[in-house]
Image: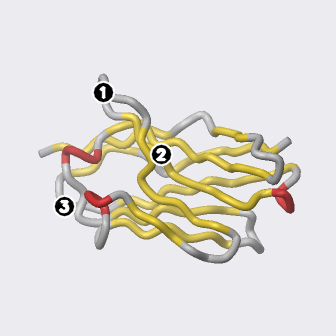
Amino acid sequence: QVQLVESGGGLVQSGGSLRLSCVYSGRVFSIYFMGWYRQGPGEERELVASIRNSGDTNYEDSVKGRFTISKDNAKDTMYLQMNSLKPADTGVYYCKAVVYGADEYWGQGTRVTVSS
């Protein structure tokens, strides 16, 4: 199994920045995909950014140029640097890991609120 713990959420004004962290533990060697997902108020959870073991990254259109996903394997931590935040970025951000064999693991989420 894989355990994921997010942190770094909070309240920020529009135009501000936050960095989210996701510490992973357990069978980390079996992870091949990780992603950050956002669930806004009354909305479904959506993929915001993802990163594969190859280093390939992918971003949802609305965050391109503003968010950066990265991993530090030495610290077993994934990050999401969020700049130029907008009220539409408000939501609970979840970290997800997918392992070989297709099992998925989720963190408990961290809340981001962007005020206008």
Q: Amino acid type of disc 2?
A: Tyr
Q: Is residue 60 above or below residue 54?
A: above
Residue at the (31%, 44%) spot, across then down: 11
Residue at the (17%, 54%) spot, across then down: 14
Check if mark 3's residue and mark 2's residue have beta carbons within 8 Å.
no
Observer-nearest residue: 26 or 56?
56
Observer-nearest residue: 55 or 74?
55
Residue at the (63%, 56%) spot, across then down: 34
Q: Quadrant of the C terminus?
A: top left
Q: Amino acid type of disc 3?
A: Gly
Q: Where is mark 1, residue-wise?
A: 41
- Which residue is the extreme one toward the front? 101
Residue 53 position within the rendered picture, expressed as x and y whole percent measured from the top left: 70, 70
Q: Amino acid type of disc 1?
A: Pro
The first of marks 1 and 3 along the sequence is 3
The first of marks 3 and 2 along the sequence is 3
Q: Where is mark 3, residue-wise?
A: 15
In space, the residues marked 2 and 1 are separated at their CA atoms by 13 Å
Q: Where is mark 2, residue-wise?
A: 37
Observer-nearest residue: 95 or 104?
104
Q: Nearer the viewer, mark 1 or mark 3?
A: 1
Q: Residues within 10 Å of mark 3 (few under 14, many from 20)?
A: some
Q: Nearer the viewer, mark 3 or mark 2?
A: 2
Residue at the (29%, 60%) spot, across then down: 61
Q: Quadrant of residue 88?
A: top left
